[in-house]
Image (spheres, rainbow, N blue to C red):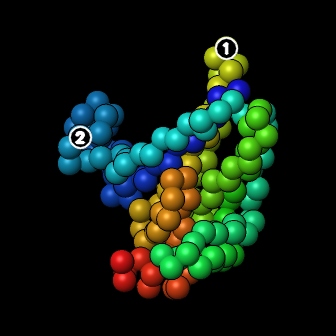
Amino acid sequence: MNLHLHFILVNSEYNQGIADDLNEGQETEDNIKHLWEDELKVTEPVKEFKIKNNSAYILAGYFPDDKEFSFEIPDTTIVDCTTESGKNMQFAVSKKLLKRTEKIVDEKNDETHLYFYLRDALPMETPMDGVYIIRQDFPKELKNSAESE
């Protein structure tokens, strides 16, 4: 199966009433529904995936000096994927960022689309594609590392 993940930042100032009254229900340049969308397609066919709510995500990698790091990010929704070749991948969103989620299965094309609608009112960090962490939960050590580069 092909797995697509859509991360969409919802404009909290969007007004459906204005869209209905002035533009036949459609958004306009001054009344935008979504501020941006990141679409990711898992590069290989996916054998299975699980969505884990209220989980801790482990953000791991290397500092610029090649020293390893690993931080636990609390209260996240994680998409755990296993590809047909056996690779494991994770995508994560802080629970406080989520406005809503949606899953659409297209059996005819063997595709699944997962939509994550994100709140624009809370600052976030995106350390890599498919990972959206509320700024208050983002490790201070990584903020300092990124600022010094």
- Residue 109 lies, with reference to residue 74, above or below; the image says above
Residue placed furthest toward the top: 108
Q: On the rendered image, what quadrant is the C terminus found in?
A: bottom left
Most foreground residue, 66 or 96 = 66
Residue at (74% x, 48% y) in the render: 88
- Left or right: where does residue 35 sit relative to residue 58? left
Residue 120 appearing in the image: yes
Q: Please determine whether, in this image, residue 95 is positioned above or below residue 70.
A: above
> How many other residues sit within 10 Å of disc 1, few (<14), some (14-19) or many (≥20)?
few
Instruction: Residue 75 in the image: state x and y as whole percent.
Output: 68, 70
Question: Which residue does the numbered mark 1 point to in the structure image?
Answer: 108
Q: Look at 55% across and 53% down and name the residue there.
A: 130
Q: Amino acid at mark 2?
A: Thr
Q: How far apart, in angstroms, are the residues tagged by discs 1 and 2?
A: 34 Å
| Residue 105 visible somewhere in the drawing | no
Residue 28: which disc?
2
Q: Quadrant of residue 77?
A: bottom right
**Image quadrant assignment for residue 82:** top right
Of labels 1 and 2, earlier in sequence is 2
Relative height, residue 138 to residue 118 (above, below): below
Label 2 secondary element: loop
Q: Nearer the viewer, mark 1 or mark 2?
A: 1
Task: Point out residue 97 in the picture as x, y percentages from the top left corner.
Answer: 54, 64
From the viewer's perspective, is 84 left or right of 147? right
Assign a secondary structure to mark 1.
Answer: loop
The amino acid pointed to by label 1 is Lys
Q: Residues within 10 Å of mark 2 (few under 14, many from 20)?
A: few
The residue nearer to you, when weighing 20 against 133, is 133
Q: Residue at x 46, y 69 (%)?
A: 124
- Residue 92: x and y in percent read 63, 58
Point 59% across, 35% down: residue: 43
Say if mark 1 contacts mark 2, CB within 8 Å: no
